[in-house]
Every structure is written in C-alpha cells, then in structure tokens.
Amino acid sequence: MSTARQLATYASVGVGATLAHYAILIALVEGASWRAVPATLCGYVVGGLIAYLLNRRHTFASDRPHAEATWRFALVAFVGFCVTYALMSLFVDRWAAPYLPAQMVTTVLAMFVTFALNRRWTFG
C-alpha cells in the first residue's frame, strides 16, 4: 500500500479513535468537572486501544506478533501522549485557548508523529 493510502487509512481509523477520545474528554470535562488536560489524557488511552486494533489490521496489515507489536505501539502511543500533554498544556493552561479547538489542533499534529513512527517501527 502506498504511503498516501496508508496515511488516508490511518486518518480514517483515527476518526473512530478520536470520536471515542473526544467523547471521554467531553464527558469528563462537562459531566464530571474534570480539568481538560487530565480528561484528554484519559480519552487518549481509550482512543489508543481502538487505534491499535484497527491500524494493525486495516492500515498496516501487519503480521508482526502481538507480543512485539503491542509494546511498540504502546511506546509510540506514549510519545503521542507526551505530545498531547505538551501541546494541550501549552494551548489550554498557558495560552488559555478553548479546550476543544486546542484538542483538534493537537490531534492533527500528534497524528503525523505517530503515523511516521508506527509505519516505520511498530508495524513495519
């Protein structure tokens, strides 16, 4: 599969994972009065589980054993988690940006980082 097609599939899978992420984020902020940064990190974990399962099968069609791919994916997800934390802290806590637009920008930037790492290292 070409890089462009993989990126498009990765982005499509990301939509489902992101919907779950945002549902958790909004529920925790609006329903449980959590602060935006911890709430988005919880959503990130749920979205990450969904992303692993769908990307392994549909985006990268990987036959790398789960025992190897899972820890690699988790490490890449941790990098994305750190990118998410840093950007959301900057946008929301430092610049007082509204949390949802900040999360949208953060999601796109983190997607490019994690796609490159997952394509080359996790499932490659």
Image (spheres, helix red, strand yellow):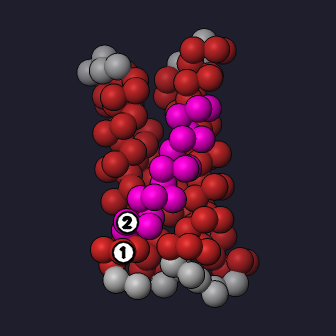
| Disc on res. 26 | none
Query: In the rendered image of this protein, does residue 44 appear above or below residue 48?
Result: above
Name the chief secondary structure element in magenta: helix
Q: Give the CA separation, mark 1 to mark 2.
A: 5 Å
**Would residue 60 be found to the left or right of residue 4 on screen?**
right
Q: Which residue is the site of mark 1?
A: 5
- Image quarter for residue 61? bottom right
**Would residue 40 be found to the left or right of residue 110 on screen?**
right
In the rendered image, is residue 17 in sight?
A: yes
Q: Which residue is the site of mark 2?
A: 8
Q: What residue is rendered at 55% in x and 50% in y?
A: 16
Where residue 58 appears, as percent x and y from the top left, is 56, 73
Mark 2: amino acid: Ala
Whether tag 1 and tag 2 are in contact, CB under 8 A, the answer is yes
Q: What residue is rendered at 60% in x and 65% in y?
A: 54
- Image quarter for residue 26? top right
Query: In the rendered image of this protein, does residue 31 appear above or below residue 110?
Result: above
Of all residues, the one furthest to the right in this rendering is 67
Where residue 114 appears, as percent x and y from the top left, is 42, 62
Asked whether residue 21 is drawn in magenta, I would say: yes
Q: Secondary structure at mark 2?
A: helix
Query: In the rendered image of this protein, does residue 116 appear above or below residue 12?
Result: below
Mark 1: amino acid: Arg
Q: What residue is rendered at 34% in x and 31% in y?
A: 102
Asked whether residue 87 is drawn in magenta, I would say: no
- Image quadrant in which the N terminus is located: bottom left
Q: What residue is rendered at 57% in x and 14% in y?
A: 30
In the rendered image, is residue 38 in sight?
A: no
Magenta residues, start to end:
7-24
Where residue 11 appears, as percent x and y from the top left, is 41, 59
- Image quarter for residue 57? bottom right
